[in-house]
Image: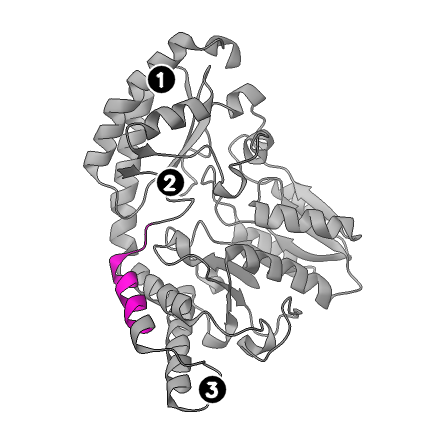
Amino acid sequence: MIYLDNNATTPLDPAVCDKMSWFLKEHFGNPSSLYPIGRDAKELITQARETIAQALGASRSEIIFTGSGTEADNFAIRGVLDAFPDKNEIITSSIEHPAVVETANYLEKKGARVIYVPVDPYGSIDLDFLKDSITPQTAIISIMHANNEIGTIQPIAEIVKLAKKQGILVHTDAVQSFGKIPCNVDDLGVDLLSISAHKIYGPKGIGALFIRKGTKIQPLILGGHQERQLRSGTENTAGIVGLGEAVRLLMEKSEEDNERIAKLALELKNGIEAQITKVRFNGHPTNRVKSTLNFAFLGLEAEAVLLALATKEIYVSTGSACSEDSEEVSHVLNALGLKPEVARSTIRISLGRFNTKKDVRTVLQELPPIVRKLREISALDPDLLE
C-alpha cells in the first residue's frame, strides 16, 4: 500500500500507539478524582498540555483540549462571538476548511454578518480587501494558516497587525500547518489557534485550541469544571496522552521529516509534470506547505484517476476528506477561478512521515499510463480546458 492522503489523516506513529496502549492498560482513573489514580491521570494530562504549549511557544494554561480540530474551530469563532454580544461581524476567507465555512454559515443564519475575503489564482488572500472589510462591528478574523487542499500559506502575522490596530481578535486554523511549518503563537501574534492530533500521527478524536491569556471567550459545552470551565466533560485522557506524544515526536523529528518529505514531493511533482501532458498544478509555486501537491489532469474526471490508482493500492484524494462525499466542485478550487471541468479533474497528493523514495518511483511508474489510458476513452477534450 502507498498512502498519499496524509492531509486527510495520518497513520498512528508506533511510539504514539505504544504510549496510548501503556496508558489504557495501566490507568483508568477519572482525572477529576482526588485519590491517587485520579491524580495520576491528571498529571499525564498536565504533561501533555505542557508539551503542546512548548511546541507552540505558549503557556500551559493557554491550551484547551477539544474533541477535534473542527470543534476547536467552532469553539474559537462561536465562543468569541458569544463573548462580544455588541459585535456581529466575522471576517474569514473563501477557501477555509468546512469547519470554519459551516460555522460561518450557521452564524450568518443567526444574524451575524460574514465577510469572505477572496484569493488570487494561487490561493493567497487579498490583504487590501481584508483591511477594507474591518469595521467597528468586527468581532473576529479567522483565516487558516495553510490550506488543506492546495497547501498555500497565508500571511497570518500581517493579518494580525491589521487586526490589532482595531482591537480585533484573530484565529487561525493551523491543523494543516502545525508540524510542517513554524507555528509559534507569539511570532504569528494570533489570539486563538486550532490543531488536531490525527494530522500529526496521533489518534483521531482529540484536538486542542490555544487561547491567549486574557482573550474573552464563552464555552460551547457546559456541565463541568474541566479545562478551566471552558470545555466541560470528562477528558479523553488516552487521546490527550496520544496527542502529547505525537507533539513530542514532532519536536524531535519535524525538521528532518520535513526536509526529506519536501525532497520526495519535489521529485514527484517534477516527475508528473515531465511525464504527463495537459497537467495543471494548483496552489502557490513556493509559498505553500511542500508536502501538498494538487494537480488537475485536464480532460479527465478526478474520481476515475483516484479509483484507477486505488486498484494499484495507491491512495490519493480529490480534496478535503470532510467534503469528499459532496458532488459539488471544491469551493477552494472554485475560489481560485478554475473552470468546473478543471476542478473536477483535480487530485490531491499529500505526503507524510512514512512515505519513501520507492513510493514516489512507483507512483511515477503507475500514474502516467493510467492517465493516458483514461484520456483515450474520455469524451472531454483537454485542449478546451486550458
Q: Secondary structure at mark 3?
A: loop
Q: Residue at the spot x=67%, y=63% of the render?
A: 80
Give the residue number, with chain letter if any, for mark 2: 5
Q: Is residue 35 left or right of residue 192?
A: left
Q: Amino acid at mark 2?
A: Asp
Label 2, residues with CA under 10 Å away: few <14, some 14-19, many ≥20 = many
Q: Nearer the viewer, mark 1 or mark 3?
A: 3
Magenta range is 11-23
On residue 172, the disc is: none
Q: For the point 22% across and 29% down, which residue is it?
A: 362
Amino acid type indicated by mark 3: Ser
Q: CA distance from mark 1 to mark 3?
A: 59 Å
Q: Residue at x 28, y 43 (%)?
A: 261
Q: Are marks 1 and 3 in contact (CB under 8 Å)?
A: no
Quick check: can you spot residue 379? yes
Q: Amino acid at mark 1?
A: Val
Name the residue beneath numbered marker 3.
33
Q: Residues within 10 Å of mark 3 (few under 14, many from 20)?
A: few
Tell me if residue 15 is in the magenta stretch. yes
**Element type at mark 1:** helix
Q: Is residue 134 in sight in this rendering? A: no
Label 1 packing within 10 angstroms: few (<14), some (14-19), many (20+): many
Q: Quadrant of residue 332?
A: top right
